[in-house]
Amino acid sequence: MATSARKHRRIRVASPLDIRKWILDEEDVYEGLCRRIEALEAVAEPLAKLFVRFGIALGTTTLDMLGRTKEVRILTEEEEGVLARASAANLVAAYWRQHEYRRGVRFPPIMIAGAPWDTLPDHIHVLDLSPEEILKAAPTKEIVAQLSRVRSPRDQSESLHLLLGVADGIIRQFGPWALVMNPVVVITLFHWLVLAKFAPTKAQAKYAASCADALLDALRPDLSRRVVRTPNHLANAPEDSEELLANARKLKVLQRQHAFPRAILSKAKKWFGARVDGRDLRRWGRMTAAQIVTDVLGGEKPKTKKTLRDYSRLADRAGYIAEAWQTFRTDLESRPPQDQRRITGALQPLVSPHNPRDPRSK
């Protein structure tokens, strides 16, 4: 039987910059963001009460495990709105993880917290989607009915399993940032690790350890899906590989001619940087010119002229997007406080440490 061609259809992930560039074409960014927030509220509306109930239950459970039950309080109407929109944003992100937005193309990972001008390098923000794309994730009547029948956890075991599912979802959404952005992740991991160490039976310990392992596995990066054409990389575009390759070939000629080591080292420092030393030259003696360039670029393959042109084009777009958001933020500060809160308070704030530097950087 012939295999369906559909099974082998290649699906790629769109560049975050291709999605985030909507701001460059929007005549009124404020109105555009308001329409997107209204779409989120429309997705949340059928399940808003359920979202709030489970959000409160989740917060209560987490605080209870921290021994801080006195901090539980009734949410304000504004806080309930943020919780409902955040839950709807989570539905939208989950929907688009499973669907193509264009034939053969899926969205990058979607942020559901913070503001659209503060986005992780390989992500887009839920408010980067059009109102129509947000509304496509609205739950059907059948799903609303199913979710409405879900009950709150009755005991600690059910609470821990609820937290396990929530923590896994947070990690899938934010990666390593989940450890500092949401206490649910750390508390859940801590409790499963403690159960694994002190459970009364071996079977219970093994099960608890497998739950902890599931969270740790989720935290590990999937390098097969690593995105390199992000604003951070584009702002520091790689050196011209053609020039590096030409210099590497000249180095190989010097090595084959058995030139004086000090002369070779002097040239190598000029061509590849002052940090080059004798160990580098001995290692490069066993490499081809192309392999030397890869080594100089920290393991990245040499870039072709076409790739470098593409880097330049995307770097320009990243700059235009950043400038457009800065212009909007300046305009937003001049608006009435309620208009500012409509945008900045639409979703939960994003709190994150600065990105760490490459420990191998010179």
Image (cartoon, rainbow, N blue to C red):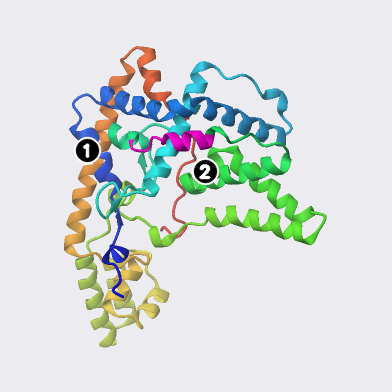
Q: Could you tell me which residue is drawn at 63 percent across and 31 percent down?
A: 57
Quarter occupied by residue 40:
top left
Amino acid tagged 2? Ile
Q: Nearer the viewer, residue 93 or 304?
A: 93
- Residue 231 shows up from this direction: yes
Q: Position of residue 173 (x, y in %)?
A: 46, 45
Q: Position of residue 11 (x, y in %)?
A: 30, 58
* Residue beneath disc 2: 170
Q: Could you tell me which residue is drawn at 38 percent across and 13 percent down?
A: 337
**Left or right placement of residue 120 versus residue 170 in this view:** left
Q: Is residue 239 above or below residue 318?
A: below
Residue range of the region highlighted in magenta in the rendering: 136-147
Q: Position of residue 260 (x, y in %)?
A: 31, 83
* Residue beneath disc 1: 320
- Residue 130 shows up from this direction: no
Q: Is residue 320 above or below residue 49?
A: below
- Whether residue 128 appears in magenta in the rendering, the answer is no
Q: Residues within 10 Å of mark 2 (few under 14, many from 20)?
A: many
Q: Nearer the viewer, residue 237 or 117?
A: 117
Q: Which residue sits furthest right?
A: 200
Q: Position of residue 357 (x, y in %)?
A: 44, 51
Q: How many marks?
A: 2
Q: Could you tell me which residue is drawn at 24 percent across and 32 percent down?
A: 324
Single out the mark in the foreground, 2 or 1. 2
Q: Nearer the viewer, residue 198 or 333?
A: 198
